Amino acid sequence: MNFDHIFTVTFTLFAIIDMLGNIPILISISERIGQIQAWKATGFAGILMLVFLFIGESFLHVLGVDLKSFAVAGSILIFIMGLEMTLGIDIFKTEDGSQTGSLVPVAFPLIAGSGTLTTIISLKTNFAVLEIVVGILLNLLIIFLVLRSLRLLERLLGRGGLLVIRKFMGVILLAVAVKIFKTNLGIG
């Protein structure tokens, strides 16, 4: 196990999941549905991520898609998400009219959405499965802590602080996307 790799995987997933950037959305959801059940949302998101880590590749093979092609496609998706965060635009739309609370839209698609699942599969081309599992588990801890302390974080960071964090994470995602793209196309 390489700790630099674990850090990279953890930080990449942290940037994709964007729990700090999602605080305003999560607060809005909690105002509509009541308190978000942190354990339930974290557990469901974790199950989705781990299932996709272990059988996502087999699922792709059934569809006739190789891992490198999926990683390139995923890098494009990650790049677009980074652009969204950096430029403050919405390209991807989520349905937020659901009444299932902690599971939809919090656990899926906000936490373990297409970007997260795509990233997990894409990371398999560059990192060991154990490193990815550790990165997922560390992110699940962060997810749980953020969900449990939404109001406190909102007060501490303020709207301006949340915006700065979101922009910074967007730039990190752009860099990660370029790296995954280059690696899987065999460029530099």
Image (tube, rainbow, N blue to C red):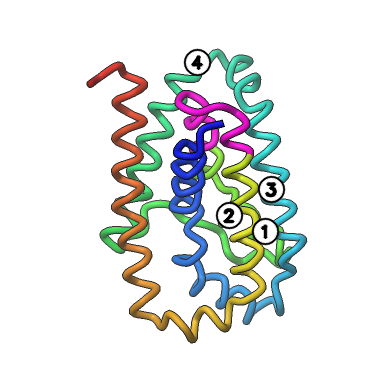
Residue 66 has which mark?
Answer: 4
- Can you say which quadrant of the picture contains the C terminus? top left
Mark 3 lies on a secondary structure that is helix
Compared with 113, 104 (above or below) is below
Residue 104 has which mark?
Answer: 1
Check if residue 126 falls in the magenta segment: yes
Q: Which residue matches tag 3?
A: 46
What whole-number distance in Å separates the C-alpha atoms at marks 1 and 2? 10 Å
| Amino acid type of the residue tagged 2 in the rendering | Ile
Q: In terms of sequence position, does the residue under pointer 1 or pointer 2 come before the other? A: 1
Q: In terms of sequence position, does the residue under pointer 1 or pointer 3 come before the other? A: 3
What whole-number distance in Å separates the C-alpha atoms at marks 2 and 4? 25 Å
Q: Neighbour class for label 1 at 10 Å: few (<14), some, many (≥20)? A: some
Residue 78 drawn at (x, y percent): 39, 42
Residue 40 drawn at (x, y percent): 77, 60
Residue range highlighted in magenta: 118-133
| Amino acid type of the residue tagged 3 in the rendering | Gly
